[in-house]
Amino acid sequence: MEKNRLEAFSDGVLAIIITIMVLELKQPAGDKLSDFFDLAPTLLAYLLSFVFVAIYWVNHHIIFHDVKRVNYPILWCNIAWMFVMSFIPFTTAWIGSHPTAFAPVSLYFFDMLLACLTIHLLIYLIARENGTAKDFNLGPRNIISIITYTLAACLGGFCPIAAYIIVAAVSAWWIFPERKKGK
């Protein structure tokens, strides 16, 4: 199967996700600068989510750059990843309204964990289909990301500010994609 349709569909879904997130932003209740600053939790949640989606979009492009073959497990795993990603606007809006409440914060970071796990499964399936499964391994950055998102999902409701900062730092680490061996 050709990878082009998968990439085009993924690009479209991610563009829609970002569009939904920005449409969820409400204008300030009044005309004072303080009314704008009252939206800080919502705007920060939007910023974190936008960067999260953007990082995944860049890395998804890199993942598929050298892919030669795509099979049904890869297609379905990619769809599962997009399904998880499609919840980001919902969880972003929820934590924007309730930035320190246990359930919204935990669900937000649980969604990030699921995105992380499904993309790693996708990478493994691609490696297996393209004959490079022996080279597949979870490096320190991958493991740290999984642990961070897991802890943020479990404990984020107890200490949300720390969870946001740690997840933002680990997510920012992925702005610079991993270099492939030999490149």
Image (tube, grey):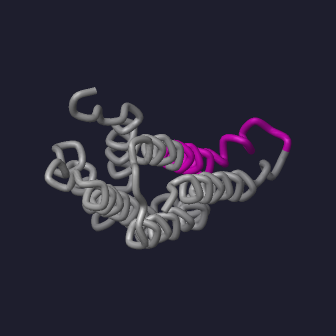
Residue 131 seen: yes
Residue furthest out toward the top: 183
Q: Nearer the viewer, residue 161 or 59?
A: 59
Q: Nearer the viewer, residue 121 or 48?
A: 121
- Which image quadrant is residue 170 in? top left
- Which image quadrant is residue 96 in? bottom right
Residue 149 seen: no
Q: Is residue 131 above or below residue 139?
A: below
- Determine the residue positioned at 39% across, 42% down: 66
Q: Is residue 178 above or below residue 120?
A: above
Q: Position of residue 5 (x, y in %)?
A: 59, 58
Q: Nearer the viewer, residue 104 or 176?
A: 176
From the viewer's perspective, tell me whether residue 139 is left or right of residue 93: left
* Number of marks drawn: 0
Residue 104 belongs to magenta span: no
- Determine the residue positioned at 35% across, 61% down: 122
From the viewer's perspective, tell me whether residue 175 is left or right of residue 53: left
Q: Position of residue 19 (x, y in %)?
A: 71, 53
* Magenta stretch bounds: 31-52
- The C terminus sits in image quarter: top left
Q: Position of residue 13 (x, y in %)?
A: 62, 59
Q: Is residue 167 above or below residue 117?
A: above
- Determine the residue positioned at 68% across, 57% down: 16
- Per the picture, the main secondary structure of the magenta-coloured stretch is helix
Q: Position of residue 134 (x, y in %)?
A: 14, 53
- Determine the residue positioned at 39% across, 49% down: 67
From the viewer's perspective, tell me whether residue 95 is left or right of residue 103: right
